[in-house]
Structure formats: structure tokens, C-alpha cells
Image (cartoon, rainbow, N blue to C red):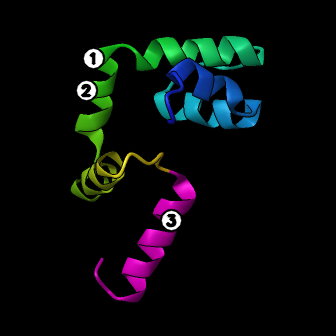
Amino acid sequence: MDGKTLKDYLEALTKDELIKKMRIAGLKHSGLDKSTVAGSLNEYLHDEQNIERIWNSLSPLEHEYMDVFLKYDEVPSYDKLDAMLKNMRSKEII
């Protein structure tokens, strides 16, 4: 993330992007302003138990996907994952 903190990254997202991430995390977001949503996500993602729970819920394919992004220091995106899955389906890998 180019030396930026998680909080910097979250604060740069739109409120809609933050809300999507709140839903994934299972957090309530209704009626919250952008800075409160970013703060809630930041707090949630700094809890090691939450990260462990998320990691353990991933499929083997998702683990591999995350490993590649971590190896090359990239930020994963759902668009990249979707493109990768479509490519794999077209080759009948999955």
C-alpha cells in the first residue's frame, strides 16, 4: 500500500466501497458517516482474531490468490479475482 496505513487506505475509499467491506466483515453500517465506517473497519481489521477468522474461512483457491498478492505486494481486488475465475472457468480448471 505504498507506505500508507490501513486507515489511510480506508479513508481514501468511497462510502459505497466501505459499506461493501463492512458487509463482508459482517459489521453494521446503517446510518454511519464515512469517517465512522472507516474507523470501524480499521478497528475490526486491526484485531488479530478477526483476521484469523477471515483467513480460516477462505477456500484453498482464495488462500492461493491472497498468497500471490501478498508475495508481489499488491492490493487484491474483486475485479482481478473475477477475471481470474472467469479465465479458469474458460480453461475448465474449476
Relative image position of residue 29 (x, y in whole percent):
66, 20
Q: Which one is in front, 14 or 50? A: 14
- Looking at the rendering, the stretch of residues picked out in magenta corresponds to 77-94
Q: Dot 1, crowdedness within 10 Å: few (<14), some or many (≥20)?
A: few
13 to 63, vertically: above or below: above
Which dot marks residue 82?
A: 3
Disc 3: CA contacts within 10 A as few (<14), some (14-19) or many (>=20): few
Residue closer to the observer: 23 or 35: 35
Mark 2 residue crowding within 10 angstroms, few (<14) / some (14–19) / many (20+): few
Residue at 48% of width from left, 45% of height from top?
75
Q: Nearer the viewer, residue 72 or 16?
A: 72
Which amino acid, mark 3?
A: Asp
Q: Was residue 82 drawn as part of the magenta stretch in this picture?
A: yes
Report helix, strand or loop for mark 3: helix
Q: Quadrant of the C terminus?
A: bottom left
Give me the residue at 27% from left, 36% from top. 55
Asked whether the residues under the numbered discs 2 and 1 touch, taking CB atoms below 8 Å apart as contact, a structural biologist would say yes
Three-letter code for the amino acid on which mark 1 is drawn: Gln
Q: Which label's residue is closer to the chain start, 1 or 3?
A: 1
Per the image, the residue denoted by label 2 is 52
Determine which of the numbered discs, if any, sits on residue 49 in the image: 1
Query: Of helix, strand and loop, which one carries label 1?
Result: helix
Circles 1 and 3, Cβ within 8 Å, touching? The answer is no
Q: Residue furthest bottom?
A: 91
Horizontal side, residue 32 vs residue 91: left or right:
right
Magenta portion: prevailing SS class: helix
